[in-house]
Amino acid sequence: MAAKLRDAFEARELTYPSNLLTIARLLLVPLTIFYLRRPDRRRRALLCMGLAMLTDALDGPIARRRGEVSRLGKVLDPIADKLVLNTTAVTLSQTRGFPWWITTMLLVRDAVILLAGLLVYRRTSSITPAQSTGKATTVALTAAVLLYTADGPRSGKPALYVALIPFALSLWQYGRRFVALMRHHNQSDAP
């Protein structure tokens, strides 16, 4: 499988501006967590999170405009989104009253999506793009996380409950897509 993954990406994809933005988002994670753990540095945490959001908003349109939609970007972008949200949710659960049950649901959901994606790739050698509800979940959870960082549960909790709507829809949509991909693969393998 490692050789298969190595062959899936071209080294030049690392130089695409869109992928560099995604890598920058990944590099902002440790700094964001560092600032989140210090109550007197909340504004800096918000700035880092804002920059991460900006890279997320720009990387896709830049890739499409430049004709540089890449296999690396299709993998790296959702991983970066999940890493930013998951580490931030864990840190906010530890420091700002972000509900642990939601953090746990987020971690489990993303682990299942990652494992299902790896299974699909292993069987079909295709990288499936993010679903619309997954993107909506990322936007809604990011807004809730920003509000929790800025104002704690008072503003963050209502936004978080709204974010549960696309979150639940994404579970359903990803589950349906996974089952359809596996059925299609199994039918194509049938004699």
Image (cartoon, rainbow, N blue to C red):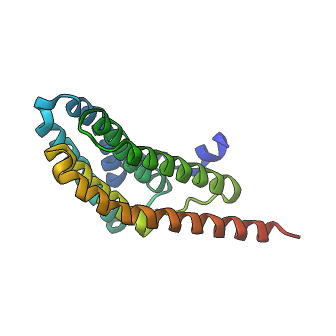
Tally of numbered discs: 0
Coordinates of residue 146 in the picture (x, y in percent): 21, 49
Residue found at x 22% / y 45%: 49
x, y percent for residue 113: 53, 53
- Residue farthest along the right direction in this orientation: 191
Q: In this rendering, does residue 67 appear at all?
A: no
Horizontal placement of 59 versus 168: left or right? left
Quadrant of the snapshot with the C terminus: bottom right
Quadrant including the N terminus: top right
Residue 32 visible in the shown view = yes
Q: Is residue 27 above or below residue 81?
A: above
- Expressed as whole percent of the image width and height from the top left, the position of residue 65 reads 32, 68
Q: Residue at x 37, y 41 (%)?
A: 100
99 or 175: nearer the viewer: 99
Where residue 118 appears, as percent x and y from the top left, is: 61, 50
- For the residue pair 48 and 126, the one nearer the viewer reads as 48
Name the residue at 49% across, 52% down.
109
Residue at figure coordinates x 36%, y 67% from the top left: 64
